[in-house]
Amino acid sequence: MPAQILPQVGAELFSIPWGHHKYIIDKCSSDPDKALFYVRQTLENGWSRAVLLNWLDSNLYERQGKAITNFKATLPDTNSDLAQEITKDPYNFAFAGITGKYNERKLKDALLTNITQFLVELGTGFAYVGKEYRLQIGETENFIDLLFYNLRLRCYVAIEVKIDKFDSRDIGQLGTYVTAVNHLLRDEQKDNPTIGLLICKSKDSTLAQYALESSSQPLGISEYELQKLYPAQLEGTMPTVEEFESNLKKLVTSDESPAAKGGTATRI
């Protein structure tokens, strides 16, 4: 009897170590598509178990390719899907270590201080070109927040970082930068059209989609997250300041009661 030929999916499953499978089963047992995503990403990128666990914990499956973009309308079909795949929403900037007040310069400095982690979060194939990259457009100096080159897409990627909610006016600025990079830096014989990515603190998805439809340049809009002070599952279980003060007043009142003065212990 001829040996059965395993389907491609089966071959993929048997191509990664059992230790990786244990992590994937633990995190994705109820979602086969999610599990297969991590299997394929592990094979494609050669992830160690530590790297795989990091991506599992940061919910890569739920974030990858989720930016709002106009790539389908502005890029050739051969590039639009891959361009969408390299985006994330939200981006995880926990590695920046910012927990207090900050401005855009502090955030960008923190991202570049941790450039290795930043490149890992951006994804496979990103190469750093420059920060506040100068473009002379006519008689005006302009500066792109962050400029990268993606080796998989073979194109420049201009990134603007905003610490506020998305404003549709940002699209005009980013679109201008993308056009300028195409004119001033892009080699039409080697490079595909430049892509722009706006990463902001928050966005109205409908407004973002309308703004992108108004642009002829390939642009995407994503949010970012800084590290949380406590796990999401604890949200709602920690007392508010008002609740804490109320409980404290009750405790003080109880301590001042005749029973408390008589030495009776108070249970909290």
Image: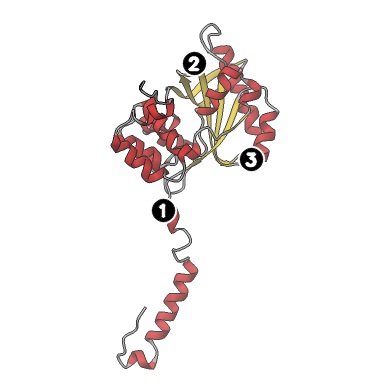
The answer for how far apart the CA atoms under marks 2 and 3 are is 28 Å
- Which residue corresponds to mark 3? 205
Mark positioned earlier in the residue sequence (2 or 3) = 2
Residue at the spot 55% in from the left edge and 29% down from the top edge: 197
The answer for how far apart the CA atoms under marks 2 and 1 are is 38 Å
In what quadrant of the picture does the N terminus appear? Answer: top left
The answer for how far apart the CA atoms under marks 3 and 1 are is 26 Å
Is residue 140 in view from this perspective?
Answer: no
In what quadrant of the picture does the C terminus appear? Answer: bottom left
Label 2 close to label 1 by CB (< 8 Å): no
Is residue 216 in view from this perspective?
Answer: yes
- Which residue corresponds to mark 1? 231
Badge 1: few (under 14), some or many (20 or more) residues near its Cα, within 10 Å?
few
Report helix, strand or loop for mark 1. loop
Q: Amino acid at mark 1?
A: Pro
- Residue 155 position within the rendered picture, expressed as x and y whole percent measured from the top left: 51, 17
Q: Amino acid at mark 2?
A: Arg
Mark positioned earlier in the residue sequence (2 or 1) = 2
